[in-house]
Amino acid sequence: MLEDVVKDKYKRPILSLRITITNRCNENCIYCHHDGMVSSKDEMTPDELYLITKIAKKIGVRKIRLSGGDPLVRKDIVEIVEKIASLDFKDISLTTNGVLLEKYAEDLKKAGLDRVNVSLDTLKRDTYKFVTNMDYLNEAKAGILKAVEVGLYPVKINMVIMKDINVDEIKDMFMFCRQHGIILQLIELIESENCEDDKFSDEYHYPLDPIEKTLADMADDVYERKFMQGRKKYYINDGEIEIVRPVDNSKFCANCSRLRITPDGKIKPCLLRNDNLVELINHVRNGKSEEELEEIFIKGINKREPFNKD
């Protein structure tokens, strides 16, 4: 039931909050956005993140996702998860590159983390080094398998599809995922306004339409997620592939139920826009009441405007 959930002016319920708790990372991927760069000393503290998620819970948010950068570079990541988990959300997840996941997976599970998404675009070492500018493929794979072992289920792999880089690896990645009971998410590359090369998107963008057509022809079953941007899941030979297409996809906007918080503590109403951010963390640090913070959340929600209005 959605009666207790705040909706934006387009009647989209706000069910999920994604919080970028750091922009620090131990990799330097070629497509990274680096939203809202802040120093580590200015990152939101565990107590501040607890209060922010508490307010989110009051307005009906049911799911929390922690992201980065890479959240696992924060030495207090287990404490952060533990505090948020005490609020009894339906789902708490974390997106990571997996490099430090083997170290933290068991403690995160005990702290209350439900599941993880691991960004992994390739199983080839040379390609991995090109995309991430690092050589941590073995560590990332070990982290993924540890997450499966401790029950951070379902484990998902986020594979950003890039022309002439990894399009030909989709089958191999799917086989790896199916072997270990992992869900594969194929993600359409979106343009990064922070990328130094303004031709980056043109050079590497690969439309997922032909891939979706192939999957549809192969699938034993297809399911569309109503409140997750209309994403489609394709079930093939006991494996699962999900498609994430924010580029020129009206369903992505029409069915978006997610609000975001940037690493510098601003409410980000839309994934694809940075021109309508709403200040939040300074109000938290200045001692605003929970009721006042709730109104700031509502202000951010009211600024939600579909990027694609088709």
Image (cartoon, rainbow, N blue to C red):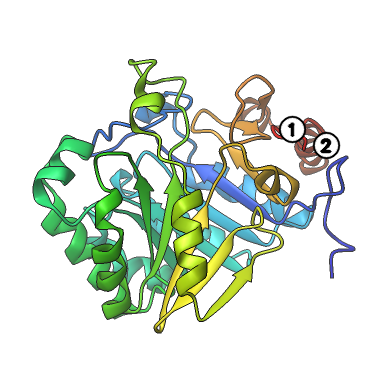
- Rendered location of residue 57, percent (x, y): 71, 56
Toward which corner of the image does residue 233 lie, by quadrant?
bottom right
- Rendered location of residue 143, percent (x, y): 23, 63
Toward which corner of the image does residue 38 lie, by quadrant?
top left
Cα distance in 3D space between marks 1 and 2: 11 Å
Toward which corner of the image does residue 202 lie, by quadrant?
top left
Which residue appears at 30% of the width and 49% of the height?
A: 167
- Residue 100 sits above or below residue 308 on the image: below
Q: Label 1's element?
A: loop
Circle 1 residues within 10 Å: few <14, some 14–19, many ≥20:
few
Position of residue 182 in the picture relative to residue 213 (left or right): left
**Residue nearest the viewer, comparing 152 with 82:** 152
Give, as a three-letter code, the residue at label 2: Glu
Q: Label 2's element?
A: helix
- The residue beneath circle 2 is 295
Position of residue 29 in the picture relative to residue 189 (left or right): left
Which residue appears at 26% of the width and 47% of the height?
A: 166
Let me know if residue 59 appears in the view.
yes
Which quadrant, please, contains the N terminus? bottom right
Q: Disc number at residue 79?
A: none
Let me know if residue 121 appears in the view.
no
Which quadrant, please, contains the C terminus? top right
Q: Disc number at residue 288?
A: 1
Position of residue 64 in the picture relative to residue 202 (left or right): right
- Residue 209 sits above or below residue 153 on the image: above
Give, as a three-letter code, the residue at label 1: Lys
**Residue nearest the viewer, comparing 200 with 46:** 200
Which residue appears at 77% of the width and 57% of the height?
A: 60
Which residue appears at 21% of the width and 38% of the height?
A: 132
Circle 2 residues within 10 Å: few <14, some 14–19, many ≥20:
some
* Of callouts 1 and 2, the N-terminal one: 1
